[in-house]
Structures are given as structure tokens and as C-alpha cells.
Amino acid sequence: MTTPEHQSPAPQPSVPGSRDRIYRSAQGLVGGVLLLALGGWLGIDALFSGHGSTPWLALAAMILFVPLVVAFTLRPAVFADNDRLRVRNPFRVVVVPWGEVASLRSAYSNVVVTKSGTKYQLWAVPVSLRARKRAVRQQARAESGGRRGGLFGGGGGGVAGGLGGMDLTGGAGSGPAADVGPVRAETDKIMDELREMLKAREKATASQGEVTVRWAYEVMGPMVVGAVLLAVLLAVK
């Protein structure tokens, strides 16, 4: 499940220093911490207990493994404020002003599409088909409960109508289906929030500008060094 770390109120006019809404994958964070803990334990054990070339192989593997895990689990995040959408993916950081966003699409993955037609995947907001199916089932149960409430609630023709208009069940519109909107998967709710921000801010003066893309060399560099070192060690072993 992906959850927002901070949620600000409904989009307001641009304010200097306004805080980002930050969205990250809870499963990714948990999985990344577990993988790093396991890899660190095995790697450190090999470094201090291994013989021959084993410590060097363990060191090279850790140099490759740690940034790779961080890139795909801990690093991805989506930052949204009144002026732009900043997408931090495993190996790139993409900044898209709201005025350059053509659409936010959800299918088998969530993507932002710029007006030039370029698509950028939102790694921190992964689509869960399982969560969507669960939301559909919950929505169906809520609607079914609402219909049953309508049968025995108000309306004059049911039990309540036959008792002088007394609504013994709280009324047809008092069930869960009436109190809340359609049941949605968590990542779909996040995309709905981003679409609302896009609608509110796409024409604002402060939301105009160019799309920028920066490669994450701080992640890619150690990975390349670890991969080269590991390949050399394996070749001369």
C-alpha cells in the first residue's frame, strides 16, 4: 500500500515555501530495510569470516547490492506541491511543472504524461490489481447494503412508511454507501489527489516552465564500480 507521508489541505494558490505532499510505497520501504539487513548480515559475515578471495567478492557484491536495493525500494518517491510534480525514480529525478502535465494515467502502472508526449512512470505509486479487486468487492458490498437499507428505510412504501413515516433503520441514505464515496484502492486515491491538483494548478503562472530530468549518478556510480570490481574478481578467480 502506498501512503502519503504528508498531506496538505486542498490545493491553494502558490505560497512561497509551501510544503510538498510526499508519497512513497510502504511495502517498498519495509522490503528495502529487510533486504539491506539480510545483505548486510551475510556480507559482513563473509568479510570477516571468509578466506582467500571471498572477502573481496563480498565487498564488491555489497558495493553493487546496497545502492541497487536502495534505488528500487527506499529511493522512489513522488513530491507534489502547488507548482510542480517531482518524480524520484530509481535512476532519475523528473520535475514536471503542472502546466506541462498533459495527463496522469492509471492502467497497469501509474504514469505522468507531458504535453510533449513523454511518459514517466511513478515508481513510488505502484498499481495493485489485487487492491483494485478488493476495492471493487467492498464497493459491491456497500451498495448491496445500501439497497437493503433502502428497502426497509424511508420512502413511504416500506415498513417505515407504514408506521407513520418513522425510519427505524436510519433511512435509506444513512448506510456506509451513502456516507462515503466510491471505494477506491489506495494508489488510485493518490492519483485522484494528483489529478485534482493538476486541475486546480495547471493554468497558474507559477506552474509553468520546462520539464527537467536529472540522472541519479550518486546511485549509478557505486553500482558500476561494484559491478566492474565483481566481474574482475570473478574473471581472475
Image (cartoon, grey):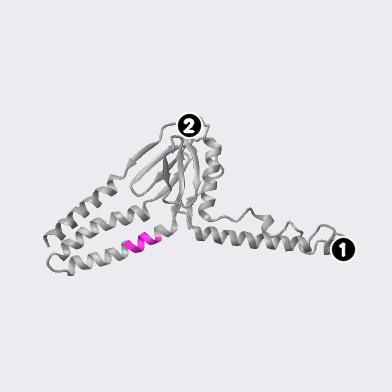
Q: Position of residue 65 (x, y in %)?
A: 27, 58
Identify which residue is drawn at 50% across, 45% down: 105
Dot 2 alpha-carbon crowd within 10 angstroms: few under 14, some 14 to 19, many 20 or more: some
Among the 4 quarters of the image, the one containing residue 143: bottom right
Name the disc covering residue 162, or none: 1
Name the residue type under label 2: Ala
Among the 4 quarters of the image, the one containing residue 96: top left
Q: Position of residue 191 (x, y in %)?
A: 51, 48
Name the residue type under label 1: Gly
Identify which residue is drawn at 27% across, 63% down: 40
Q: Earlier in the sequence, mark 2 or mark 1?
A: 1
Among the 4 quarters of the image, the one containing residue 50: bottom left
Magenta highlight on residue 79: no
Secondary structure state at the residue bearing disc 1? helix
Q: Position of residue 84 (x, y in %)?
A: 46, 38
Residue under pointer 2: 206
In this rendered view, identify the residue nearer to me: 12 or 219.
219
Q: Give the dominant element type of the magenta stretch: helix, strand or loop.
A: helix
Q: Position of residue 192 (x, y in %)?
A: 55, 47
